[in-house]
Image (spheres, rainbow, N blue to C red):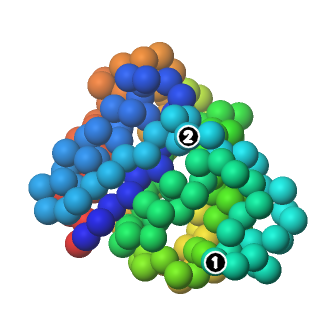
Amino acid sequence: MNILILSGSPRRGGNTELLVEAFVKGASQKHHVEVVSVHDYKVNPCMGCNACFKNENNACIQKDDMCLIYDKMAVADMLVIASPVYFYGLSAQLKAVIDRFHNPIRDTYHIKKTALLLVGAASLPELFDGILAQYQLCLNFFKLEDAGRVLVSGVKDKGDIRNADALHEAFHLGSNVQ
């Protein structure tokens, strides 16, 4: 299986990146895994102009790096969303990429499964609720299978995640992807 991970953390060596690395170690035993750190790509927010619904090959009028991500998604069987939680939502860089999935080119993808890796500093029980609601709506709309979730709260500073069981959970999730 080809697994594409969209990682939304702009912080190198941070908790989200460590969680992604643990998932990759597990998943790469059986699958091809590619990590896209979205902050390394210039992706503009969707303008909602719907030109992609009319243009040949569903081309977006914006000339940015999203076309590179579309190409990676075209060969993926599974998509993993990984993000730090900023003010109860995904990182802005990742949200811009996800919003660009508005393009009907998404209907040509072969993605059947998704997974979610989230890291937040707060310890509120409802910390992930907003993201989980959006995630579930996407699962329902696109008829995707949820392959699993690792949700880590109470980790703020770089490396805090090493003191939690989350890295083991992410490795286990990755190694059990079917």
* Residue bearing mark 2: 41
Image coords of residue 176 (percent x, y): 21, 63
Q: Which residue is nearer to you in this view: 32 or 112?
A: 32
Residue 29 in which image quadrant: bottom left
The quarter of the displayed image where residue 76 is located: bottom left
Residue that carries the numbered disc 1 in the rendered image: 57
Picture layout, residue 145 above or below residue 19: below
Amino acid of disc 1: Asn
Q: Quadrant of the C terminus?
A: bottom left
Instruction: Give me the disc on residue 65.
Output: none
For the N terminus, which image quadrant? bottom left
Residue 26 horizontal/vertical position (percent): 19, 51
Residue name at image x 64 percent, y 65 percent = 101
Element carrying mark 1: helix
Between marks 2 and 1 in the image, the one whose residue lies nearer the viewer: 1
Left or right: residue 132 versus residue 169 is right
Tag 1: Cα neighbours inside 10 Å, few (<14), some, or many (≥20)?
Answer: few
Residue name at image x 50 percent, y 24 percent = 11
